[in-house]
Image: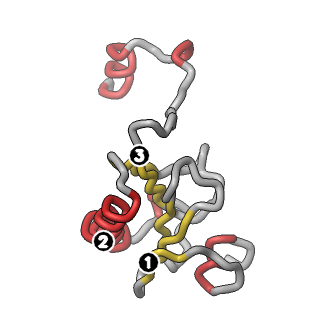
Amino acid sequence: MNDCIFCQIVKGEIPASKIYEDEKILVFLDVNPSTNGHMLVIPKEHYQDLFNLDEEIITHSVKVIKEKLYPLIKSKLNCDGLTICQNNGYGQEVKHFHIHLIPRYNDDGFVNSYNKDILLPNDQVYSTLIEK
């Protein structure tokens, strides 16, 4: 995709603060971070979302997060935890699969918010999901 900003970063057409790179993925700091060290893990090949992603990419990404990135973040930034999130469709600002790694700190004030007024009772949601 020529107009995908993440594809342009992979090609080196747009600069990024690269943290990790191998033959399958690229990891760089988010330009609009939620906390210090907020980074994005992206496949080098363009996939719009999780639903058309090669399973090998997600498996490889999780392995790199677990074995390389989290230890790096923990040791260098002294975070207290890590939020890992990934959006598909609504909420996905860049239509190139990516995983957010958001280091968490006891005093970071980071809040995942949602509108509790529109939530249905869990039993109603459950019934809807399992009905045939």
Q: Are marks 2 and 1 in contact (CB under 8 Å)?
A: yes
Q: Which residue is mark 2?
A: 68
Q: Earlier in the sequence, mark 3 or mark 1?
A: 1
Q: Secondary structure at mark 1?
A: strand
The amino acid type of the residue labelled 1 equals Tyr
- Relative depth, front residue between 107 and 68: 107
| Separation (CA) of disc 2 from disc 1 | 9 Å
Q: Is residue 36 left or right of residue 129?
A: right
The amino acid type of the residue labelled 2 equals Lys
Q: Is residue 84 above or below residue 109?
A: below
Q: Earlier in the sequence, mark 2 or mark 1?
A: 1
| Separation (CA) of disc 3 from disc 1 | 20 Å
**Does residue 55 show up?**
no
Q: Is residue 86 left or right of residue 3?
A: left
Q: Secondary structure at mark 2?
A: helix
Residue 124 drawn at (x, y percent): 38, 14
Q: Which residue is mark 1?
A: 20
Q: Residue at x 49, y 69 (%)?
A: 42
Q: Is residue 37 above or below residue 128?
A: below
